Each structure stands twice: as C-alpha cells, then as structure tokens.
Image (spheres, rainbow, N blue to C red):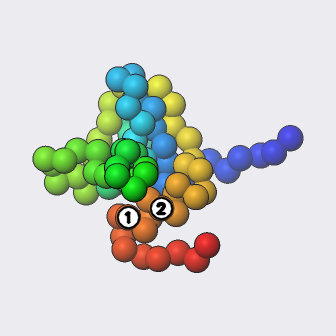
Amino acid sequence: MLIQKPIAKNDVVSLKLITGEEVIACFNSDTDSIVTVEKPATLAQGPQGMGIIPWMMSAKADKIELNKNTVIAMAPTDEEIAKAYTQATTNIQLAT
C-alpha cells in the first residue's frame, strides 16, 4: 500500500467544484469551511491544443478563498500538468 503525503502549502492541487469546473492552483491553507489557494487556473482548448488560463479573468486572483461546501474533491495535480501550471504562472522553466 502506498502512503500519500498530505497536501502541504505551495503544493499544486486540482479541485473539482460542484459546478463541474476543475481548478488548478497553488494550495495555501484550509480551515473547517474555507480552502485558500493562489493563482487559480483552468485548462482550456486553444488553437494549438490544451492550455492553462486564469480561472477568474476579471479578478486579481493572487489569493482566492473557496467555500468547502462548493469543493467536491481536492488532490495533488498530475506531475506533468503541475509543471506546466508552474511554468505558466511563474515563468520558471522546469527541466523535463
């Protein structure tokens, strides 16, 4: 049996919301009722394939609080998608 480490601050996580949206973000913290994430983004289809775009286009989304009642699931993001998210949100190029 594999033991999965708990989600920690600055981990890239994927959240599935009750609306059906999937959000990729940097985990900050959580309480009994709130999950706080930074730089939330989502996947979108573009002319050159899938891309990562801001989740909230009109907001300054450095830090967002989500009501836990609206979050169905939260899990660590797939490694390749997490690398792409980090590159898109920080302009840091990671080794492949």
Q: Residue at x 86, y 41 (%)?
A: 1
In the picture, measured across the screen, residue 46 lies left or right of residue 7, that is left
Amino acid found under the numbered disc labelled 2: Ala
Residue 33 appears in view:
no
Q: Residue at x 67, y 50 (%)?
A: 5
Residue 67: x %, y % from top left:
33, 30
- Badge 1 element: helix
Mark 2 sits on what residue? 84
Q: Residue at x 28, y 51 (%)?
A: 54
Estimate the spatial distance between the alpha carbons at disc 2 and disc 1, rounded to whole Å.
6 Å
In the rendered view, tell whether residue 95 sits above or below residue 66: below
Q: Residue at x 48, y 43 (%)?
A: 14
Mark 1 sits on what residue? 88
In which quadrant of the rendered view does residue 87 lie?
Answer: bottom left
Number of the label disc, if any, that sits on residue 48: none
Residue 88 appears in view:
yes
Toward the right, the furthest residue is 1
In the picture, measured across the screen, residue 87 lies left or right of residue 56, that is right
Amino acid found under the numbered disc labelled 1: Ala
In the rendered view, tell whether residue 32 sits above or below residue 1: above
Q: Nearer the viewer, residue 4 or 84?
A: 84
- Badge 2 element: helix
Q: Nearer the viewer, residue 2 or 16?
A: 16
Q: Are marks 2 and 1 in contact (CB under 8 Å)?
A: yes
Residue 61: x %, y % from top left:
23, 52
Residue 86: x %, y % from top left:
44, 64
